[in-house]
Amino acid sequence: MHAVSQEMNEWIDGFLFVANKPILDLLNTKPVLADGPTELLPDVRALERWLIASGMVTSPKIRAIVRSWRHSTEAAAFLKHLIAYRERLRETVLRIENGSSPTDAFLAEVNSLLLQYPLPSSLHKRDGMVIRETLFDLRKPTDLWAPIIDATADLLAETESSRIRKCESCVVHFFDTSKKGSRRWCSMNICGNKLKVAAYQRRKRASRAPAFGG
Ligand SMILES: [Zn+2]
């Protein structure tokens, strides 16, 4: 998984990447667009495109494996499970953002998936440094659980919860990596400017007409 530069590549192949964490980017595959809440992962073909856009799938060999799932009932069943999981994760992230902790039921589900789909890793020396590399072997759709559950565990246990935040103006979640920790919007281009323009117009109107009390 690679980090995506915030300003340059917010949308890749129709998917939003503004969260600074792929697991939150996965959450953001159901944004509210002009027509209302929009499912960006309606079928296995869309999942394949998201895996490539997110950088989870890169090599030609793995791309070919994922392509071969297009008409697989196993992949369709996995996607259905993944979407349901995504919504339970959304509830959990909303709880965290409200200062609460995950439910025991959700932790039990994550624990069960952690046991079922462990993400093995190994250590290598490179330029005198020891590097930890995950050994993610993707063959069947359910193999995707390993990185997804590992990322969930990282989000719940290793991430500063006060920096997990929802955009003030839409449904998009992100991890705030700004120096001051004061990021408020999914993106300056999407919600930030819109709100700044609205505030400016409100001020302009207020200065033109007598303000109503309220
Ligand atoms: Zn937003």
Image: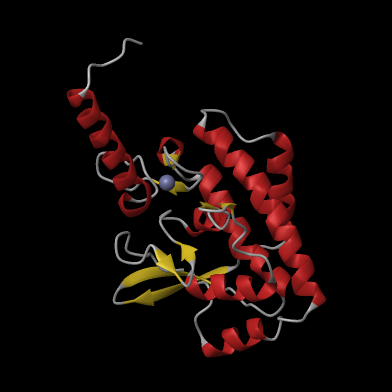
Name the quadrant containing residue 185.
top left
Q: Residue furthest front?
A: 209
Tell which of 93 and 101 is nearer to you: 93
**Total label count?**
0
x then y, percent, for residue 205: 24, 29
Name the quadrant containing residue 142.
bottom right
Give above or below for 111 relative to 11: above
Q: Residue furthest top?
A: 213
User: Which residue is located at x 52 percent, y 76 percent?
Assistant: 52
Tell which of 144 and 45 is nearer to you: 45
- The C terminus: image quadrant: top left
Whether residue 181 is visible to the viewer of this picture, yes or no, is no
Q: How is the image coloured?
A: secondary structure
Image position of 85 (left or right of 59): right
Q: Residue furthest left?
A: 207
User: Which residue is located at x 52 percent, y 51 percent?
Assistant: 154
x then y, percent, for residue 75: 75, 73
Image position of 87 (left or right of 60): right
Give above or below for 66 relative to 104: below
User: Which residue is located at x 37 percent, y 47 percent?
Assistant: 191
User: Which residue is located at x 68 percent, y 80 percent?
Assistant: 139
Give above or below for 172 relative to 82: above
x then y, percent, for residue 36: 57, 50
Tell which of 92 and 36 is nearer to you: 36
Tell which of 119 and 17 is nearer to you: 17
x then y, percent, for residue 117: 70, 63
Whether residue 76 is visible to the viewer of this picture, yes or no, is yes
